[in-house]
Image (cartoon, rainbow, N blue to C red):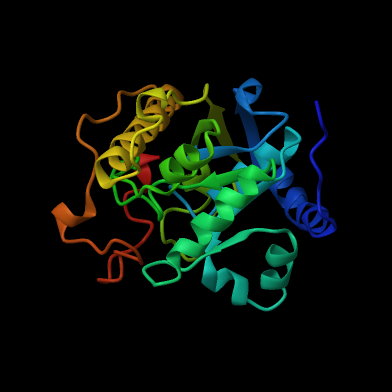
């Protein structure tokens, strides 16, 4: 097994982020045996809070995996933070633009270099009122089927208590237990060798999201809904904050 390399900027980011995470969260890490130790792979995770990239990175880092996230390009333009995430080899995503394909090309290259690439198949915070995974975009499936790499599904529950979707301030106390559960690689063998057209990519994406939803159901002790939330069916924007109509972003916290 080859030890994965940590860039100096990655160690700096961990040194900054880890102490508050240790101070303000309890951790329930499960399924680390499914993480690939010697080769590139994709982690496909649900996205329910601005806090969950930190908690997911904490889970992976604690298990010897330096993840490379696909993140909004705007983050890379933030003073100081942008320089750190760039030096830590994170991957900018130019959403809804002609440059959107650059992130997928970079993700494919990262996997081929042997790295772990984290993809949120939903591509934004879930709009589902009960915080189940909603319909997804095809990036994770495209990277996996292009490279032949494994896709490890990961579910998180608890980060929404630190920061409810689109809330402006975190809630640090009382300490929240963050549950992270990784599952076995998703079986995408049915799509191997097929053209990477819209039909194939959608089916593979649904398979990945089904696996994530099942894991989330285990964490929550609930059954995932049969029909996945689609923002288009509810007149919601595909990206951006759907709470900008004046509703309180912390509304509905009892769901957590």
Foreground residue among 144 and 215:
144
Foreground residue among 208 and 110:
110
The residue positioned 45% from the left and 38% from the top of the image is 145
The residue positioned 56% from the left and 45% from the top of the image is 118
The residue positioned 30% from the left and 38% from the top of the image is 200
| In this rendering, position of residue 79 left or right of residue 139 | right
| In this rendering, position of residue 254 left or right of residue 143 | left
Question: In this orientation, does residue 170 appear?
Answer: no
Location of the C terminus (image quadrant): top left
Q: Is residue 22 above or below residue 207?
A: below
Residue 26 occupies quadrant? top right
Residue 134 occupies quadrant? top left
**Which percent across, then down, holds residue 20?**
72, 51
> What is the tally of numbered marks visible in this picture?
0
Question: In this orientation, does residue 144 appear?
Answer: yes
The residue positioned 22% from the left and 61% from the top of the image is 236
**Which percent across, then down, holds residue 178?**
57, 37
Foreground residue among 124 and 18:
124
**Which percent across, then down, holds residue 71?**
54, 60
Location of the N terminus (image quadrant): top right
**Which percent across, then down, holds residue 245?**
25, 71
| In this rendering, position of residue 67 left or right of residue 205 | right
Q: Is residue 141 above or below residue 84?
A: above
């Amino acid at each position: 097994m080859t030890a994965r390399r940590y860039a100096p900027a990655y160690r700096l980011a961990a040194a900054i982020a880890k102490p508050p995470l240790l101070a303000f969260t309890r951790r329930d890490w499960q399924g680390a045996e499914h993480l690939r130790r010697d080769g590139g792979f994709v982690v496909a995770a649900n996205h329910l809070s601005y806090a969950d990239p930190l908690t997911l990175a904490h889970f992976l880092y604690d298990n010897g995996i330096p993840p490379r996230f696909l993140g909004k390009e705007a983050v890379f333009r933030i003073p100081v933070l942008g320089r750190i995430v760039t030096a830590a080899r994170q991957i900018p995503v130019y959403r809804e633009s002609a440059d959107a394909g650059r992130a997928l090309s970079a993700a494919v290259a990262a996997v081929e270099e042997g790295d772990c690439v984290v993809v949120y198949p939903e591509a934004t915070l879930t709009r589902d009122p009960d915080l189940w995974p909603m319909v997804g975009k095809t990036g994770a499936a495209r990277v996996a089927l292009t490279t032949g790499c494994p896709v490890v599904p990961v579910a998180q529950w608890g980060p929404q208590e630190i920061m409810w979707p689109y809330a402006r301030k975190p809630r640090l106390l009382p300490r929240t237990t963050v549950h992270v559960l990784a599952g076995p690689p998703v079986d995408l063998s049915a799509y191997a060798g097929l053209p990477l057209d819209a039909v194939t990519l959608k089916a593979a994406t649904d398979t990945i999201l089904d696996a994530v939803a099942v894991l989330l159901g285990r964490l929550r002790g609930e059954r995932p809904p049969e029909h996945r939330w689609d923002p288009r069916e509810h007149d919601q924007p595909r990206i951006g904050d759907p709470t900008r109509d004046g509703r309180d972003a912390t509304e509905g916290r009892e769901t957590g």
